[in-house]
């Protein structure tokens, strides 16, 4: 059974958690944060996405990659030359993709979803801080699915396969919308980015005003939905901003069978607007959990490091974070982060958090962080 359903015992959570130890012991002893290695310097000229107070060390695997030698350049130096068709074509061809749309910021309104072909090994999409991709309020922007025959299945077991790797950096995503409803066969959720299988990394990017369908017990990820991912490598969300995104669950992020590392990121005013939880209560369409982040599955972890999550809301549980591990164990770890004013409409077992592992309500591991 996915989700929580019967785990309504954690309705408390009125207090706050502060500076807890790595064992998740009771709070109340203010601790001086340990010295952290300095983060990698941001390239000059790029917009300041992410948490301005986030100074967590980013592992090399979570950083932006070089695009000095692109395989494809979208545009010929003018805004008019940067089209939806050019983005769709470049993503299908794969490799390192950059833009040449002129010296000023440009918005490309997508008239079709850009889809990764699974025979690609790595796809890098870099907007150099000048490019916004818009769904025009009508469509999903990026799609990768290792189990989609139309995109070429490359292994005998496409679930949790290692490649392709999709890297998105220095881009803005806005007004994406996935209208797909939850069924047994639909690829639901993921308003701006839908990724099933392979690896995903998103660096120094912004997600504003994206949406996916309004209800569904497991439907989520107005900005990003990642499921059935390669479990040996986390989904890296590095120095990104998520603001004003709405979905049934997971206003910003939704994960199913995926490890996430959310580093130096800012999440503000994202909303889980579904109703009835998961599995859906009788007479409801389901959903409404994880205002900012909704994750589910077996034997996985979620790490929040150097990140600020505030002003998010869930109609059901976990105004900031909904974390459920159904079997195999897993840990929600919050380090050097601040989570404040993330109301949960119905239930939580820590302020703004619902944390359940192997059928038991548990407390997140909190290290030098404040949660209220």
Image (spheres, rainbow, N blue to C red):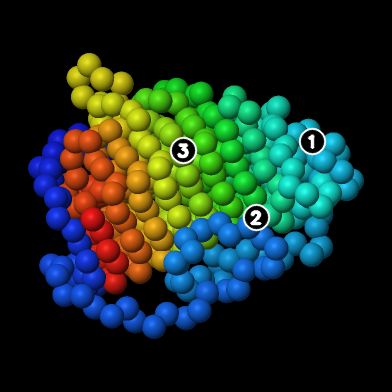
Q: Which of marks 1 and 3 is nearer the N terminus?
A: 1
Q: Which residue is the site of mark 2?
A: 170
Q: Residue furthest bottom?
A: 35
Please tell me which of labels 2 and 1 falls first in the chain. 1
Q: Which residue lies furthest to the top in this view?
A: 283
Question: In x, y percent, where is residue 71?
Answer: 81, 54
Q: Distance between the residues labelled 1 and 3?
A: 25 Å
- How far is the residue under mark 2 from the one under mark 1? 18 Å
Q: Is residue 368 left or right of residue 194?
A: left
Which residue is under mark 3? Answer: 245
Element under label 1? loop
Measured as percent of width and height from the top left, residue 126 is found at 70, 54
* Residue identified by numbered label 1: 83
Check contact, mark 1 vs mark 3: CB within 8 A.
no
- State the residue in front, 117 or 4: 4
Residue 123 appears at what percent x and percent y? 68, 51
Give the residue drawn at x 72%, y 56%: 128
């Amino acid at each position: 059974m996915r989700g929580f359903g019967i785990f309504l015992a954690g309705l408390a959570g009125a207090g706050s958690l502060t500076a807890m130890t790595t064992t998740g012991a009771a709070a109340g002893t203010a601790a001086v944060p340990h010295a952290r290695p300095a983060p990698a310097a941001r390239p000059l000229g790029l917009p300041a996405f992410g948490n301005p107070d986030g100074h967590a060390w980013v592992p090399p695997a979570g950083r932006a990659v070089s695009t000095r030698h692109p395989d494809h350049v979208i545009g010929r130096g003018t805004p008019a030359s940067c089209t939806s068709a050019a983005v769709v074509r470049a993503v299908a061809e794969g490799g390192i993709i950059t833009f040449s749309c002129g010296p000023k910021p440009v918005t490309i309104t997508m008239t079709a979803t850009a889809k990764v072909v699974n025979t690609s090994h790595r796809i890098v999409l870099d907007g150099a801080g000048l490019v916004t991709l818009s769904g025009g309020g009508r469509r999903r922007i990026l799609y990768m699915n290792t189990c989609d025959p139309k995109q070429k299945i490359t292994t005998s077991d496409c679930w949790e396969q290692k490649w392709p790797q999709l890297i998105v950096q220095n881009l803005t995503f806005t007004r994406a919308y996935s209208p797909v409803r939850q069924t047994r066969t639909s690829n639901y959720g993921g308003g701006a980015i839908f990724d099933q299988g392979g690896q995903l990394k998103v660096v120094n990017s912004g997600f504003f005003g994206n949406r996916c369908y309004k209800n569904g017990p497991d439907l989520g990820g107005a900005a990003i939905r990642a499921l059935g991912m390669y479990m040996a490598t986390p989904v890296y969300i590095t120095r990104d901003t998520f603001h004003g995104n709405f979905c049934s669950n997971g206003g910003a992020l939704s994960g199913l069978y995926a490890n996430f590392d959310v580093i130096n990121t800012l999440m503000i005013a994202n909303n889980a607007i579904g109703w009835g939880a998961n599995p859906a209560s009788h007479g409801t369409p389901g959903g409404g959990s994880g205002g900012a982040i909704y994750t589910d599955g077996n034997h996985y972890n979620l790490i929040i490091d150097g990140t600020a999550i505030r002003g998010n809301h869930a109609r059901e549980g976990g105004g900031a974070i909904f974390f459920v591990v159904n079997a195999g164990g897993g840990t929600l770890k919050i380090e050097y982060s601040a989570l404040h004013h993330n109301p949960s409409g119905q239930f939580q077992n820590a302020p703004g958090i619902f944390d359940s592992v192997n059928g038991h309500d548990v407390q997140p591991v909190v290290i030098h962080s404040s949660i209220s």
